[in-house]
Amino acid sequence: MENIDKYYFTSESVTEGHPDKLCDTISDKILDECLKKDKNSRVAIETFASNNTITVAGQITSTAELSVEKLVRDTIKDIGYLGKEIDIDYKTCNVHIDITKQSPDIAMGVDIGGAGDQGIMFGYACKDTENYMPYAIDMAHKLAKKLTEVRKTDEIPFLGPDGKTQVTVKYENNKPKRIETILISTQHLKTATLKEVREAVIEKVINKVVPQNMMDSKTKIYVNPTGRFVIGGPLGDTGLTGRKIIVDTYGGYSRHGGGAFSGKDATKVDRSAAYMLRHIAKSIVANNLAEKCEIQVSYAIGMEKPLSVYVNTFGTGTKSDQEIIKIIKDKFDLTPKGIIEYLKLQKPIFSNTTNYGHFGKPELPWEKVVKL
C-alpha cells in the first residue's frame, strides 16, 4: 500500500480596511512621505486606532516637512472609510500625534552602518506556487485582494472595507492537493442580508480567484459565520501597527523572528534583513538548489555583520545546507548598508508592501531572482 504523507495547513489574510492594516498603511504612508523628501530619513512610527480616534507616535529624524494629520485623514479616505455610521469618519475623527526624534543612543550605532536593533529574521521560499510562496497564504491574499477590488469597483456595492480571509489546504507528500476550507468574513451595509452577501462573495470573489481543480464537493465554504458584520474597522475593534506579522510574511508556514515591518525605515533590520533573506531564499529555490529553503540571521544593535547565518532546506537541497551558507556569504553583503544599497531601500516603495503580503509581488526588488 502506498505511503502518502497527508496534512492540513491554514493561513489567513486581511483586507486593507482591517483595523490593524489601516494602522500599518498609515505608518508606511508616513515613511514613504519622509523618504520622498529625504532619502536618509530615520522613521519608526506606530499607529493605534480605536473607535473614532487615531494616535500616531514614534520617532522621525528627517529634513522632510509633512502634515501627519492630513496623511492620516487621506489614508482613511482612500481605504474607503467615509463615516457611514458603521465605520470611522476621516473628516471628523480625532488625530493625536506624539512624534519625537530618534534616540542619540541608537543613532550612534546606526550612523556608522550598524544595525538599528538586535534581533532575528527569517526568509523563506518554496515551489508551491509560481511566485515561490506557500499555497495557503498566497490564496488567502488573492481572495482578500479580490474582496477589496469588488468593493471599490461597486461590483458588490454593499461591502465595507473591513474583511478577513482564511484558507485550509490539504497537502499530500508536501504538495498542495486540494482546498479543504475557505472562510471569508466581510463587512457589509445593514441593508444586505446574509444570503445576498454569501451568494455575491462566492460568485464574484471565490469562483473568480480559486482554481476549480483545487475545489471539490467536499470543500467547505463559510461566509460571515456569525451571520452579521456591519460595524467594522476601529469602531468594531482596535487596530495597531505590526500586529499582522504572520499575514505579512508566510502565513505561519515558515518561522518569524517577531519584528514587524510597517513604519520602519530600512536601517531597521527587522524589515530590511527579512526582505533580503526572502530574496536569497527565493533565488536558492529558483536556481534548483532546493525545493524549499528557510534562512535565519541574527544581528546586534550597532554592529554591521550578522552574528549568525542558518539555512534549512528540509532535506530537499541539491547541495548541503553548509555549502549553501558558504554561497550566501560569498555572494551577498548582509550588512545593513549593503542590504539597503543592494535592494535600493531608500526609495518610497513601502506603501506598495503594506497590504496582501510583503512577499510574492513581482514588482518589489527583493522578489527578483539572481543566478547562483
Image: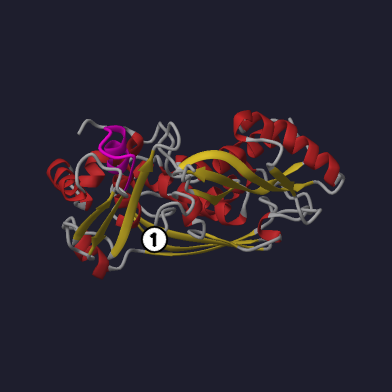
Nearer to me, 15 or 165:
165
192 is higher (above) or lower (below) than 96: above
Residue lying at 30% horizontally and 56% vertically, measured from the top left: 269
Helix, strand, or loop for circle 1?
loop
Residue lying at 36% horizontally and 60% vertically, measured from the top left: 257
Instruction: Name the residue carrying label 1.
Output: 259
Nearer to me, 114 or 31:
114
Left or right: 370 as drawn, with respect to 214:
left
Nearer to me, 53 or 326:
326
Determine if the magenta segment contains residue 330: no
Residue 190 x, y percent position in the rendering: 84, 49
Can residue 355 be seen in this snapshot? no
Residue 188 x, y percent position in the rendering: 77, 46
Q: What colour scheme does the image use?
A: secondary structure
Residue 22 x, y percent position in the rendering: 57, 52
Residue type of the residue flagged with mark 1? Gly
Left or right: 284 as drawn, with respect to 173:
left
Find the magenta span and give its range: 280-293
36 is higher (above) or lower (below) than 321: above
